[in-house]
Image (tube, helix red, strand yellow):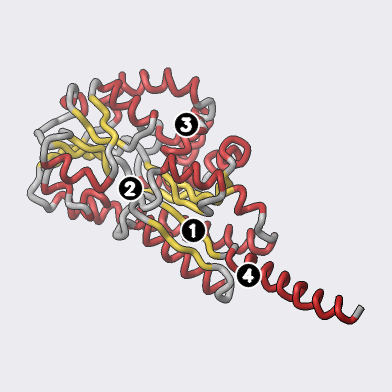
Amino acid sequence: MNYCKRITLPIFTSTILMLSSISATAQDFRLGLITPPPHMWTKAANSFAEDLNAKSNGKHKVSVFPARQLGNEAQMVQQLQTGALDMAFLTIAEMSNRVPDFGALYAPYLVKDIHHAAALLRSDTATGLLNKLPSQTGLVGIGYGMAGMRQMLSRDAVASPIDLKGKKIRITPFEPIRDFYAAIGMAPTPLPLPAVYDALANGQVDAIDMDFDSIMILKFYERADNLLISNHMMFPMVGVISGKTWKRLSKDDRKLIQQTMQQHLSNVIDHFAAQEQMLEDQIRALDITVQEVDASSVAEVIKDWEKTWSVKAPILKQLRKTAADLQEG
């Protein structure tokens, strides 16, 4: 009997230590995103990691993998679904490929400017879309961030988006923006962000769909010096957590992670809203040609886009109404 006790105790103690080790390892999270280190999304991810570590007294650690280190967004979503990746900051583009209603957030001229976009992303209509993610993707949507409003930067002089007909334009690879440019008569060309500078330099693409922030940080204006300030689309981002990771978190850990990530995503929205005018002023001061256009320049294109997406994304009508109400308010 005593012999059995002497054997059992070390085995029991060893098992407890092993389980404790597994529990500790489980709190070392991995967060992926496609933006390079200088981008605000990556900075926000790193700030979130530091904040969560501090608020959890070192219990939680987050390793951030920027610049497609873990693959493109489709590959990262697959990793999130299997639990190989715990968290990600993803363009709504990738979500729209899986949940078409998210594509409605890219409706041309849905919002008038960056501040209008920020208000819409914080509305009940937009945040309600996050409830679709667990059942349709296996991911838990935490909240939205965004980049700046979309503009068109081209190698050749243009006065209107219609002047780009027949040209190749770099886009983020998703249906709503592809359909918009295809309706103009352009050739939408998906390219990863790090490849864009060289693609402009060697003529692989004639123009790019881009925000002020990336145009300045990545110096795309050095290879394309004609800017159409169109503000034709907003560009939301969503912070997500793997459903498998979420299930193994305690109630308190879920609350802490959710609140901490939401705050840093909200900071991203505030950052872009605050800097948009400053960046526009900086770009106008460059030695490039700047033209302004509005929705009237692509009125027929918007109608064509709406015919397709009002069917694909039934939420579009409600988003338009919410956006209109916010503008009036």
Q: First in sequence: mark 1 or mark 3?
A: 1
Do the CB atoms of the residues marked 1 and 4 lie less than 8 Å apart? Answer: no
Which callout, 1 or 3, points to the residue nearer the camera? 1
How many residues crowd around disc 2 within 10 Å: few (fewer than 14), some, or many (20 or more)?
many
Q: In which quarter of the image is residue 152?
A: top left
Q: Is tag 2's residue or tag 1's residue first in the polypeptide sequence?
A: 1
Toward the right, the furthest residue is 1
Position of 318 relative to 225 (above/below): above
- Closer to the observer: label 4 or label 2? 4
Q: Which of marks 4 and 3 is nearer the N terminus?
A: 4
Res 40 label: none
What is the C-alpha distance between the residues marked 1 and 4? 18 Å
Amino acid at pointer 4:
Ser
Going from the N terminus, do you reach mark 4 or mark 2 first?
4
Whether residues under marks 4 and 2 lie with C-beta atoms below 8 angstroms apart, the answer is no
Q: What element carries label 3?
A: helix
Provide the secondary structure element on which disc 4 rests.
helix
Disc ID at residue 30: 1
Q: Which residue appears at 19% of the width and 23% of the height?
A: 165
Residue that numbered label 4 is attached to: 21
Q: Mark 2 falls on what kind of element? A: loop
Of the two numbered discs 2 and 1 in the rendering, the one whose residue sits closer to the viewer? 1
N-terminal-most mark, 3 or 2: 2
Residue at mark 4 to residue at mark 2: CA–CA distance = 43 Å
The residue where tag 2 is placed is: 148
Where residue 236 appears, as percent x and y from the top left, is 42, 44
Residue where numbered disc 3 is placed: 320
Quarter placement of the N terminus? bottom right
